[in-house]
Image: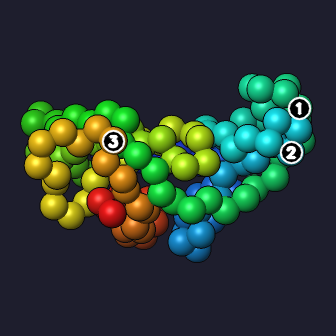
C-alpha cells in the first residue's frame, strides 16, 4: 500500500499557507468576479492572468458523496467518506465529512469547514451545519 502525500505547486502554495492559518483563501479573478479552484495561472472565464487571493466563508452544499470500503492508502483506513462540495463562492472541492454522518440522502446538505491536523499539515474537512 502506498502513502498519500501532498505536492505543493507554485499556484497552490498560497492556498495551503492560508489553510495552515485556518483562513482558507482561494484565487479570485477581478475581471470575471469569480473564485476559482484549483489554482491556475489563467482565469478560465476571462483568460486574465490577474488574480488575488481572497478568504472564503468555507460553507457550501454537498453535491456528491462516496464511502470507500477498500484500502487504497495506509493513511486512510476504510471505511472513510469523501464528499464533493460546491462552496458558496462557486468552486467545487473534494473533502471528507467529519462528525456524525447524515441519515438518508447527503445531497444538498449544508456543510462548514473545520480544520484537522494530519502529520503536521492542516487539512480542510467539512462538518454538517
Mark 2 lies on residue:
30
Q: What x and y, as percent, mark residue 34? A: 73, 41
Q: Give whichever of 71, 25 is nearer the camera.
A: 25
| Quadrant of residue 83 within the rendered picture | top left
* First in sequence: mark 2 vs mark 3: 2
Which residue corresponds to the image point at 16% horizontal and 61% vertical from the top-left? 100
**Left or right: 74 in relation to 127:** left
Q: Can residue 24 be seen in this view?
A: yes
* First in sequence: mark 1 vs mark 2: 2
**Within-10-Å neighbours for mark 1: few <14, some 14–19, many 20+:** some
In contact (CB < 8 Å): disc 1 and disc 3: no
- Disc 1 on helix, strand or loop? loop
**Vertical placement of residue 122 versus 53, above or below:** below
Mark 3 lies on residue:
108
Q: What x and y, as percent, mark residue 27? A: 72, 48
Which residue corresponds to the image point at 84% horizontal and 27% vertical from the top-left? 46
**Within-10-Å neighbours for mark 2: few <14, some 14–19, many 20+:** some
**Between marks 1 and 2, how big is the CA–CA gap?**
9 Å
Amino acid at each position: 500500500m502506498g502513502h498519500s502525500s501532498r505536492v505543493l505547486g507554485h499556484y497552490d502554495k498560497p492556498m495551503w499557507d492560508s489553510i495552515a492559518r485556518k483562513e482558507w483563501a482561494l484565487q479570485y479573478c477581478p475581471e470575471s468576479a469569480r473564485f476559482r479552484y484549483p489554482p491556475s495561472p489563467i482565469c478560465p472565464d476571462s483568460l486574465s492572468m490577474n488574480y488575488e487571493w481572497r478568504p472564503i466563508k468555507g460553507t457550501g452544499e454537498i453535491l456528491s458523496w462516496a464511502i470507500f470500503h477498500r484500502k487504497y492508502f495506509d493513511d486512510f483506513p476504510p471505511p472513510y467518506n469523501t464528499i464533493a462540495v460546491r462552496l458558496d463562492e462557486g468552486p467545487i472541492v473534494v473533502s471528507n465529512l467529519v462528525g456524525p454522518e447524515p441519515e438518508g440522502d447527503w445531497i444538498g446538505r449544508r456543510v462548514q469547514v473545520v480544520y484537522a491536523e494530519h502529520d503536521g499539515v492542516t487539512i480542510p474537512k467539512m462538518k454538517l451545519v
